[in-house]
């Protein structure tokens, strides 16, 4: 699910796995989930759904509707949909200042996606920090009109990057503190790098791929 619309396609696939829906229903659910982060055109949703059909990830079915001639096309997830969503969760996000694809992954995430999401959020935070440091190093007092305009661009970009960095760190802590077995906040979570470990019930963390840890008793994923 690559390309400029990959994030929206991935989010649509996540919504289909939650429950099937027709184009209008999915458009409304997507807008409710993502809010103003994307300027969604309702006319694009049917096109993106057809792309999912061609990829073998969605199945259209005609469903009878009272008073509607010809029924309504409802989209269902195909057998390959769950695996494709997992692969999308682990995929690299497009290089953009505000990673809307990252937000889309969080919006439709499942408990089994926590390890992939922690990796995505860690990379997002690190990349934003690198960009922010580069902008800070390049700042200087404006001496002309073009420099004055670029100073405004740099300032807005730096503020957005700072917000993205803080959001990524907080979101990682939320996921790390979720008890996957109990379906709620865990009593003990692994510490975020540079932060003191929280006290709580016993249980050891063991290393796994990508620097993740999993607690044996409650399967709490660490940052």
Image (cartoon, rainbow, N blue to C red):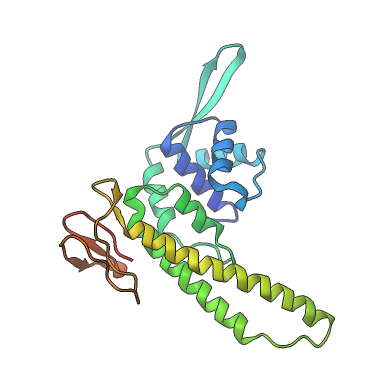
96 shown above or below 85: below
183 shown above or below 92: above
220 with respect to 128 (left or right): left
Q: Residue furthest top?
A: 67
Q: Residue at x 27, y 62 (%)?
A: 189
Observer-nearest of 143 and 212: 143
Q: Is residue 10 visible?
A: yes
Observer-nearest of 222 and 5: 222
Q: Quadrant of residue 206?
A: bottom left
x then y, percent, for residue 202:
15, 62
x then y, percent, for residue 100:
56, 57
Q: Residue at x 64, y 45 (%)?
A: 40
x then y, percent, for residue 46:
60, 36
215 shown above or below 51: below
x then y, percent, for residue 188:
24, 60
181 with respect to 2 (left or right): left
Q: Is residue 1 visible?
A: no
């Amino acid at each position: 699910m690559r390309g400029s619309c990959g994030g929206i396609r991935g989010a649509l696939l996540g919504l289909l796995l939650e429950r099937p829906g027709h184009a209008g229903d999915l458009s409304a659910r997507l807008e409710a989930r993502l809010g103003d982060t994307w300027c969604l055109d309702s006319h694009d949703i049917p096109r993106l759904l057809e792309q999912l059909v061609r990829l073998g990830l969605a199945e259209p079915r005609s469903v009878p509707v009272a008073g509607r001639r010809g029924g309504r096309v409802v989209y269902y997830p195909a057998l390959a949909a769950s695996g494709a969503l997992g692969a999308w969760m682990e995929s690299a996000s497009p290089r953009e200042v505000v990673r809307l694809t990252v937000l889309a992954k969080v919006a439709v995430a499942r408990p089994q996606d926590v390890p992939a999401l922690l990796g995505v959020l860690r990379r997002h935070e690190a990349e934003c920090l690198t960009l922010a440091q580069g902008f800070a190093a390049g700042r200087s007092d404006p001496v002309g009109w073009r420099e004055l305009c670029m100073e405004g661009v740099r300032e807005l970009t730096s503020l957005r990057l700072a917000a993205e960095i803080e959001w990524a760190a907080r979101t990682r802590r939320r996921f790390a503190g979720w008890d996957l077995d109990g379906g709620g906040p865990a009593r003990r979570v692994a510490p975020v790098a540079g932060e003191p470990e929280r006290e709580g019930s016993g249980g050891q963390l063991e290393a796994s791929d990508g620097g993740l840890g999993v607690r044996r008793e409650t399967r709490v994923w660490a940052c």
